[in-house]
Image (tube, grey):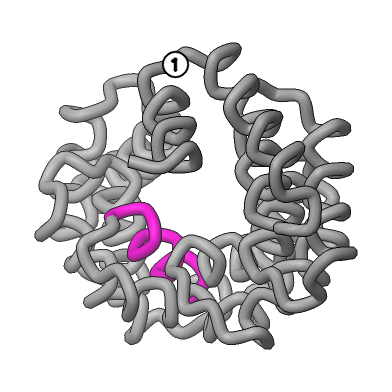
Amino acid sequence: MDKNERAIELMKEQKYEEAAELFNDIIEENPKDPLGYINFGNLLLHINDAERARRFYERAIELDKHAATAYYGLGNLYYEKSEFQKAQQNLLKVIEIGLEEAHAYYLLGMTFFHQEQFKLALPYLMRATDLSPEDTEFTFQYGLALAQSEHIDEAKPVFQKVLELDSNHSDAHYNLGVVALYEENLSEALDHFNHALAVQPEHALAANAKKQIMEVWDNTDM
């Protein structure tokens, strides 16, 4: 096990000071190698020292303009700070360089999603689900972006896939309930809202939707 591998293992063991010392040694021994700076940046970002992490990633890029993981680190950093346009710039660079990383596509899609540019989010979220089809969050957010883009028919099987991955995903049940309302199937909608509330009793949107269905039925019975 080389020093980089050992330092990464120390990070996983939450021995951050020891990992930092090793990364520092690596940089001193190989000051022109971007990998040491990238790994040290990852450590700093992990312990919420975003400003120092940014400097390490930028130094890595100075040494290698094609250091995809440095751009990925910056993209992740800016995403966590909700600086979505800066995150986009760096994540697009990751993809341009050719790093096929599901989480990079996911983050890029979500930068557009958070700016309510749902159609622009779609290809990146779809690619994230292609690369990591068992990831529940990637799949759910892709379905949500489809729904927000008014592709309701395409969103439905995606939410159903979420339930295949996690039958207790309350938000997937809620959104399938909304789809059922769109299809004018009140019984199916109510079933999904009840499932959402069984999993998450404080799910306000599901509770409100259920209340509205019950009011419609009460008025129909009158």
Q: Nearer the viewer, residue 99 or 7?
A: 7
Q: Nearer the viewer, residue 19 or 75?
A: 19
Image height of 159 relative to 55, above or below: below
User: Which residue is rendered at x = 62% and y = 62% of the image?
Assistant: 69
Residue 143 is one of the magenta-drawn residues? yes
- Magenta range: 136-146
- Write down the residue under mark 1: 14
Q: How many marks?
A: 1
User: Which residue is rendered at x = 24% and y = 30% of the image?
Assistant: 197
State left or right for residue 183 relative to residue 166.
Answer: right
Image height of 178 relative to 95, above or below: above
Quadrant containing the N terminus is top left
Q: Nearer the viewer, residue 165 or 32?
A: 32
Image height of 10 relative to 215, above or below: above
Quadrant assignment, res 111: bottom right
State left or right for residue 60 relative to residue 110.
Answer: right
User: Which residue is rendered at x = 15% and y = 59% of the image?
Assistant: 188
Question: Is residue 222 at all visible to an observer of this figure?
Answer: no
User: Which residue is rendered at x = 77% and y = 24% of the image?
Assistant: 49
Q: Considering the numbered disc 1 on the image, is that residue within a helix, a strand or a loop?
A: loop
Name the residue at the front extreme: 29
Percent across and percent down for residue 122 are 54, 80
